[in-house]
Every structure is written in C-alpha cells, then in structure tokens.
Image (cartoon, coloured by chain):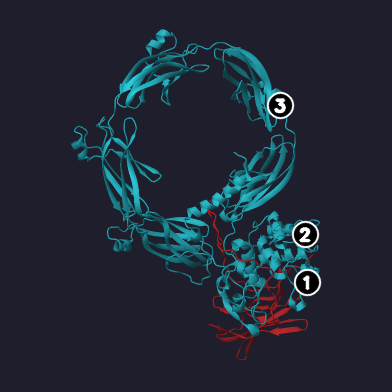
C-alpha cells in the first residue's frame, strides 16, 4: 500500500536507512575498512584499529587486482539517465562545440549479435549516454569502465570542445602511436570506438562461443608485465593477475605503472612511466570509488505506464545485482510529492534477467493523479545511493464521478437504516468509500456488500459487490442527511434525503449491588435494551476522571428475562472497580441506541490498603548488578507481588514468586516462603541508580532507590586464525566472555557490506578452558566465509555484555577457483 | 562489414585457464556502507603520454609444460597496430634451432603473437627463446629468455 509523503520525508527515510546501517555496525568508521593491497595469502589475527580511509595513494595500487570482475562486467552499473547526468557533471560549465560528449549526437547503425555481444539496434542522432548504455547492456561491460576509458585515453569527459581527431580515437582502440595516433578506419569514430573497445574488453575473457585466444595474461600465476613500451630500456616485473577484469586491462594496455608514476599519482613520473592503467585506477576512484568494492547500484525497468481514470498505472521490476536478495526501495516523484513503494511483488521478468534473484522483485500500482499531462520519475535506492530508473510523461484521462443510489431508508427508534449501491467507474471492481453527513457528524460506510445488481447495470463489468447497508444513529424528529462518495480527486454528493426518526428508549439497567473490597469495590446487576432485547448493553463506570468499560453479557440474569420476556438471561454484569481508600462517588452509564444514558450515581467507602513490603539486596558484578530479596502484600499475604526495577528510561518487570523466602514468612506469618525474587541487570560501567517499585492493590509504590558502582566487563577474548580456501576463506578459533564463562559468544564477520553470523559454541576448544578455567571447551568457532578472489579484508565482531566490539581484523588473499 | 580480428584462423595451443567465480552476495537489506570516508580530490585530465615510445617485442612468459611436453612462449609487440603481421619464435640449444610462426593479431594497442607452442624436436636442457615480428618493412626481435626443458 502506498502513501504520499513530501520529498523531505523521503530524503529523511534515506538518511535514516544510512544511520540505521551505520548503527547496526556500531562504529561506522570501522564498518568497511578499505581493502589494502596485500600479497599475503594468509594472515593471523590482528587487533583492529580505527580504520579511516586515507586520500588515494599510489601505495594502494595493486597491479594484480585493479578492478573486481563484478564492477567490470556489470551490465547494470548505470542507467542512461545516470550516464547523461554524469557527463553533464563532468563538463560542468557547458560544452563549447558539438563534439562535447554531453551534447554530441551520433548516427548509429545495427550490429548483429555474436558470441560476445547481444545485438545493437542503431538509431539516428543518438546521445553519447545512449551509446554507452546500449553497449553496456549489449556486451556486459560496465558503463563506468567505458566512461573512465574515454577519459584516460583522450580526456573526453572534461573536454568542452574536443577535436574531430580526438573523438575519432575516443577509446584509443586500434589507434597506435606507430600510426601517429590515427585509428584504423574500421574502428574510428565515437560509436565504433565505444562499441569495439567495450566488446574487446569482454572478448579478452574468452567467453563461451569464442576461441581460447587470450592466454598470455593468465589469472593466478606470475607473468612479466612491462613498465613502458620500450621493453629494453625500462624492463618489466612479475605480476600475478588475480582476476579476468584486471587481465583485460593489461590486454588493452599492457603496461603497469612504475614507482615514479605511483609516487606522483596526479602528475608525471619519469622516462619509464606509463599511465594507462594508473589513470584508469585513479579516475575510477575519483568518479565511482574503489573499483574493487561492490558498487551496489540498483537496476530496474519501468515496463508499463498507462494513464487511467484512477491515475497512473505502472509496473516493472528492480534489483540490486550486488545484493540480489535485497528488496529494492523505490519512490515515485511527481510534482515534488514523493511516494515510496517496494519492489517485492512476483516478477518473472526480474528472474529472467537475474536468475539468481528470487521471484519477488516486481512492483506495480496506481498513482492517484488528476486528469491532464503528468510527468514523473521513478527512483531506486541502491546500497550507497539512489538512481533514476526512468522518467515518463503520461496523459491521465478525466475521471468519471462516482455513481450510486440510496434504494431504501427505514426509520427506527434512535436512527434509521439506509441501503443501496455505489461504484467508482475509475476503479469499477474496488469497493466505493462512502460517508453519511448528518448535522456535524460524518459516518463511514463501505459499499462492498454483494447483491447490488444495479451497480453492474450502471457500470458494466463492475460486478455486484457494491451494495451498502448501515444503521445511522440520529435524534428523534425530522433529520436531513447527505450521502457522499470518494472519487479519484475528491468526494462528491451522491444524494441528499430527509427522514423522521422515532424516539429511542433508554436501556433498562438495575444496579443490584455495590460492595466495598480491599483497594476498591464491586458492582453487579443486569441491563436490557428495550426494542433490541437480545442485544448486550455496553456499560461504563465513571469514577473521578476514569472510565471503566463493563459488559452486560454474563449469564444468570433471570430478573432480566422476568422483566423483559424473550430477552434471555445473558444480561448480567459484575465488575471490580479499583479505587483509592476513602469515600468514592461513581456513576454508571449505559449506551443506548442513540446516545449514552446516565443510569445511577452512588457513593462507597473504600478501606485503606497497606502498601507492599520488600527486602532489597544489591550486589555489583562485572558489567552490571543483581537485586534479590522478597516482597509481600500484607492485604493478600499469599499472592505473588509484581515488582519493577526502574533503571534510567527502562522499566524491567520482576516477579516475587520464587521459593525460599524464609524472611517473608518470618515477617508475615501465614504468607509462606514463595515470595523471593532475583534479577541481574547488565549496564555500562560507572554509578548506576535505580528504584524498586511494587504493585499494591490500588496503585504502584516506590519501595527503595539505590546507587551501585558497576565495574566494566571484560570484552570477549580468544583467538582467531584465517586460511584461504576455494571460493573464500575459513576462520576458526575460540571466544569466551570472561564475565559469563559458560555462555556461548555471538559473533559476526563483516566483509564489505556483508555480515555473516558465527557462533562460538562448538566443542573441543581446550585453549578456552586453559585460558579461563571453568569455562569448559564448548567455545570453538569455525566457518567458511564466501568471498571473491583477490585480497579481502574483514573484521570479526563479538557481542559482549555492554555491546559488540571488534574481536579481530585481518586480510587474506582468496585464491582463484 | 568491419573486420573481426578474433575470427582469424590463427590456432594457438590450448591452455588451461583458471575459471574465476565472481561471487558477491549482500544479504542485509538496509546496510549502507561508505567505503571511502575521506573524499578524494577529483581529477581534471591526468598526464597520459609516455616518453620515448619505442615499439618492441616482449615475452610475458615462456615455460616448459611437462604435462604436454610443450614449450610455450607468449609474445606481444608494443605500441604498434598493423593490418597484419607475422610472429616467429626461435628456440635454440647449441646447434639445435627450432622455429614456429604465427599470424599476429591486431589488438587495441598492440600486435599480439599469442601463445606460441613448440612441441617437436625438444630435448632436455637450457633453451634460449626469442620472438620476432615483421610487417611490411618493419622488423623487431625480443630479448632472449632462457627456459629449462625437462626430461
């Protein structure tokens, strides 16, 4: 179900999600440490420090892992609108000629499908954003990669007036220095360059249906990579390429940056420096963040948009390819109004595009809109930012007003009954929402009852479940009323009528007994509504400012049957009314057909009740404190006492119903010993003040307040070892909570945006028993953490008494399968 | 129709390539993580032109594959894209000289010789391999790389 909110609320929602996300990890700066390049294949546990990402440094460049496969081969990385916005942003002040990528128009032509790319459907005067988007989609190469390549080859993203020559070799594809930078004519021009370069970057992975040609930059074993085209002068060094995407970059530009190029990231190095792959890495970081971490963008399709009398009907689907199980949060923006919705409905289209996605990534609905030409945009929230899925303009036809009729009005004592039918032609099968306006009152009525044949006649196809029938309470005499119906863009009057209402009879109520008790009094009697003999009468006791409901629906009211033959005997009432000691006045009210009637007022003297008595013992423990003792209610010696501890803003219930309270029996003979209580509270260290409350017969009593000095609890302690494994890595070790030795420790691995639960509850942890005698050995943990090939950094968190803390952080290089 | 350089009939020996299994799953619906706490100053255009560019023939790897009994040598020709060209591999050990030729593939910024294979005539010992390239009147030769051929 949708609701409409202002843009500010939507943005606040996004902000809240961000806060929630960081809150979940307790320490945002530690949530996702930037993976430092590391050649270590395994690492032992190391304490985690506060990870603050530094400005980009050449020391972070890993020649074996420049970009992840996920980011590189991401055919859903950017929408066409995203790309256009990105191009506009890069140009900034505006274009100075027609070659400028933000405004350039290029005639493209059809290209047939092959083993690497799906077909490209050409068009006249295509924008650069459209070409990049379509190549991304057709070949499965990220638009981000294409954009960065345009910049690193020719600087086209920031050039407001590029020359024809620069555009002709936009991606530097087949335009060698040996030819003076000129391109093979078959590959020259913006469209050719983007298509062939994008295709070739995918072709290097030798996809199914192609020959196994590209084999000289294999993944997973060392090869020599040059620093510079002049191999004799500048040499090479061994690099172990860790994934297909990084290999593709070397096929395209077979040089790695030397130390001078990395030491001067944004300027020149020395005579043996090359810049292609260095600049790719720098530009990608600048524009899109770390190329080795998941982008987390949402992708979706707005597949159907139709203007209807009810508004704008829409449908489509959305996923986050980097988090395929996640339900995507969407929002429609129209005229400054944001309407949130979820992509959580069944969608076969989403599953066809993303076989790993579950079945529920679709969305559909109707956005209420007035007649006319309406424009809107659909946004999707990714893991890091929201993107536009699409914008549409649609003509909404004028909505026909609701139609309906009052078919009968039957006056009765205390009101009248109306019945009839109503239909909203814009949503003919949905029930119409009606309202009766009588004097200052409005009463809702739903037209959702079956049998309304006239509705289907008036609006063919509407069906017959559009009837309504409702009793409208009203004062005696002539009454006028109007029936309203809600339409698409407001309510309209269906019909106005008059009716004469007969006087209603007051309920007959007999208050047969009022008896004081400890802490209050009891009332009993019976009640009947003349004219509706078998209906139950709703009563209420008014005492001071309080109102307490009482139902006259209990059996045994033989006097009711005697006074009103046919009423039956289920008209009795009986209730205990809590009240303070002393003389109390109260009034009994009864709901009649038309209004409430005051039946009778009485006074009663309530006896004083002694407050509860309790013994309180307090003991500080590491990370909290315990309370214990006993509690007795002198006026109800054998009843258990309900206690509550008030600690800061918290109220924690404690029951005094445990055996062994010999002190209670000694103080109150006859109370017995089942009055003990005991509870433990875990708190932050420092002075903690609390109060003990007890429920008495009439009210709650504050029994005692104390302040206790709480010592800090030691965090979970233990060991962790890490080993790379096919498809990820394994962690193992043990963990113990020093303040609760036998309790298993709950842990979680944080790697990138993922959290994976791990329980330290496995047997055989002899080291745990050795380190903490008495802890036992069931404190081991072992888990396989799935991860992409290449360097991976992660942290293991452990839940302690006062919250979660970092248990250990480590880096590991995951081998290729 | 544009020429597709990948459809050429050049037939390099097959290699077993590692198959990566990119696998990224994020299961927490609402966690938003910021990976880069400190914004990096955005670049204008970075310097990109290498100094003293010279075309050369280079061998990324040369190895003896004991399982197949083959000598495998990959080579590329830097900073040069020709319509066509020929690569040749010379393996020598004393007076023994073995040669293999392959059609070069024009690539984005190089001529690629691919992985050239010598499967006959080898015997155990230290072999010296060089790769050469010629196209029209242009010729270049790589530095020699030694490979130990086993029994």
Q: Which residue is mark 3?
A: A460
Answer above or below: position of A786 versus A628. Answer: below
Comes first in the chain, label 2 or label 1: 2
Is residue A542 toward the left or the right of residue A504 in the image?
Answer: left
Task: Tell me, by letter, which chain the rendering colours red.
Answer: B
The Cα–Cα distance between marks 3 and 2, rounded to whole angstroms, is 52 Å
Residue A671: x and y in percent read: 22, 33
Q: Out of B36 and A251, give the one closest to the viewer.
A: B36
Q: Secondary structure at mark 3?
A: loop
Q: Secondary structure at mark 2?
A: loop
Answer above or below: position of A153 versus B58. Answer: above
User: In the image, which is nearer the foreground, mark 3 or mark 2?
Assistant: 2
Hue used for the chain lettered A: cyan
Q: Out of A558 and A242, give the one closest to the viewer.
A: A558
Q: Which residue is mark 2?
A: A103
Quadrant for the N terminus of chain A, please.
top right
Residue B128 in sight here: yes
Residue at image point 32% right, 21% down: A605
């Amino acid at each position: 179900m949708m609701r409409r909110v202002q843009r500010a609320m939507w943005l606040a929602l996004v902000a809240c999600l961000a806060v929630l996300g960081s809150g979940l990890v307790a320490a945002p700066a530690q949530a996702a440490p930037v993976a430092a390049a590391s050649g270590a294949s395994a690492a032992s546990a190391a304490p985690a420090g506060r990870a603050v990402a530094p400005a980009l440094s050449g020391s972070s460049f890993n020649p074996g892992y420049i970009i992840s496969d996920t980011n590189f081969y991401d055919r859903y990385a950017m929408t066409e609108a995203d790309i256009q916005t990105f191009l506009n942003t890069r140009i900034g002040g505006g274009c100075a000629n027609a070659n400028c990528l933000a405004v350039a128009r290029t005639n493209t032509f059809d290209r047939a499908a092959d083993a690497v790319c799906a077909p490209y459907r050409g068009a006249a005067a295509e924008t650069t954003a459209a070409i990049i988007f379509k190549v991304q989609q057709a070949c499965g190469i990220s638009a981000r990669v294409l954009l960065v390549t345009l910049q690193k080859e020719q600087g086209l993203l920031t050039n407001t007036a590029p020359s024809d020559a620069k555009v002709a070799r936009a991606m530097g594809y087949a335009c060698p220095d040996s030819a003076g930078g000129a391109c093979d004519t078959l590959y020259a021009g913006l469209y050719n360059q983007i298509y062939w370069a994008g295709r070739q970057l995918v072709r290097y992975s030798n996809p199914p249906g192609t020959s196994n040609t590209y084999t000289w930059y294999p993944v997973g074993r060392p090869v020599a990579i040059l620093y510079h085209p002049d191999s004799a002068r500048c040499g090479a060094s061994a690099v172990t390429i860790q994934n297909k995407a990084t290999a593709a970059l070397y096929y395209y530009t077979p040089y790695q940056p030397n130390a001078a190029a990395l030491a001067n990231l944004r300027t020149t190095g020395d005579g043996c420096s090359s810049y292609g792959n260095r600049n790719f890495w720098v530009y990608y970081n600048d524009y899109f963040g770390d190329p080795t971490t998941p982008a987390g963008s949402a992708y979706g399709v707005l597949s159907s948009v139709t203007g209807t009398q009810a508004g704008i009907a829409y449908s489509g689907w959305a996923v986050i390819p980097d988090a395929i199980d996640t339900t995507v949060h969407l929002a429609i923006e129209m005229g400054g109004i944001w309407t949130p919705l979820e992509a959580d409905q069944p969608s076969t289209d989403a599953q066809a595009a993303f076989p790993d996605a579950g079945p529920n990534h679709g969305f559909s609905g109707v956005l209420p809109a007035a007649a006319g030409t309406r424009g809107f945009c659909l946004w999707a929230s990714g893991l890091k930012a929201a993107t536009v899925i699409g914008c549409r303009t649609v003509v909404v036809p004028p909505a026909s007003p609701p139609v309906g009729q009052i078919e009968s009005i039957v006056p009765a004592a205390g009101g009248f009954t109306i019945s009839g039918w109503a239909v909203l032609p814009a949503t003919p099968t949905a029930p119409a929402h009606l309202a009766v306006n009588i004097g200052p009152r409005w009463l809702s009525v739903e037209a959702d009852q079956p049998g309304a044949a006239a509705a289907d006649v008036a609006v063919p196809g509407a069906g017959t479940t559009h009837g309504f029938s409702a009793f409208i309470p009203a004062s005696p005499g002539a009454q006028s009323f109007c029936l309203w119906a809600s339409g698409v863009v407001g309510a309209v009057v269906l019909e106005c009528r008059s009716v004469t209402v007969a006087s209603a009879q007051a309920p007959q109520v007999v208050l047969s007994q009022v008896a004081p008790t400890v802490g209050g009094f009891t009332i009993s009697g019976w009640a009947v509504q003349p004219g509706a003999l078998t209906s139950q009468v709703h009563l209420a006791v008014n005492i001071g400012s309080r109102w307490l409901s009482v139902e006259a629906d209990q059996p045994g009211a033989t006097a009711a049957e005697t006074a009103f033959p046919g009423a039956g005997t289920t008209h009795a009432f009986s209730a205990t009314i809590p009240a303070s000691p002393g003389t109390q006045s109260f009034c009994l009210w009864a709901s009649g057909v038309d209004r409430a009637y005051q039946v009778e007022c009485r006074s009663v003297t309530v006896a004083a009740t002694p407050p509860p008595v309790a013994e309180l013992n307090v003991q500080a423990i590491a990370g909290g404190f315990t309370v214990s003792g006993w509690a007795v209610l002198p006026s109800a010696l054998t009843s258990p006492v309900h206690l509550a501890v008030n600690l800061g803003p918290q109220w924690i219930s404690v029951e005094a119903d445990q055996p062994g309270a010999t002190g209670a029996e000694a103080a109150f003979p006859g109370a017995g010993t089942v009055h003990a209580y005991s509870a433990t509270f875990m708190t932050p260290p420092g002075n903690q003040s609390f109060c003990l409350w007890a429920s008495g017969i009439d009210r709650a009593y504050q029994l005692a307040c104390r302040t206790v000095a709480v010592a800090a609890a030691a965090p979970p302690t233990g060991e962790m070892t890490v080993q790379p494994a096919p498809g990820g890595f394994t962690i193992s070790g043990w963990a113990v909570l020093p303040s609760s030795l036998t309790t298993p420790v709950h842990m979680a691995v944080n790697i990138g945006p993922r959290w994976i639960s791990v329980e330290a509850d496995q047997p055989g942890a002899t080291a745990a028993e050795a380190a903490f005698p008495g802890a036992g050995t069931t404190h081991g943990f072992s888990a396989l953490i799935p991860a992409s090939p290449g360097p991976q950094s992660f942290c293991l968190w452990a839940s302690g008494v006062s919250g979660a803390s970092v248990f250990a952080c480590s880096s590991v290089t995951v081998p290729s399968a | 129709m544009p020429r597709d350089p990948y459809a050429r009939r050049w037939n390099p020996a097959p290699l077993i390539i590692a198959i990566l299994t990119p696998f990224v799953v994020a299961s927490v619906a609402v966690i938003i993580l910021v990976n880069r706490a400190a914004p990096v100053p955005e670049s204008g255009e970075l310097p990109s032109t290498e100094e003293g560019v010279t075309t050369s023939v280079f061998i990324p790897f040369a190895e003896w594959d004991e399982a197949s009994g083959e000598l495998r040598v990959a080579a590329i020709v830097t900073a040069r894209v020709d319509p066509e060209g020929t690569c040749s591999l010379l393996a020598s050990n004393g007076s023994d000289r073995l040669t293999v030729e392959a059609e070069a593939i024009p690539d984005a910024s190089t001529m690629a010789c691919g992985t050239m294979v010598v499967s006959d005539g080898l015997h155990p010992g230290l072999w010296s391999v060089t790769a050469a390239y010629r196209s029209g009147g242009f010729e270049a030769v790589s530095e020699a790389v030694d490979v130990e051929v086993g029994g």
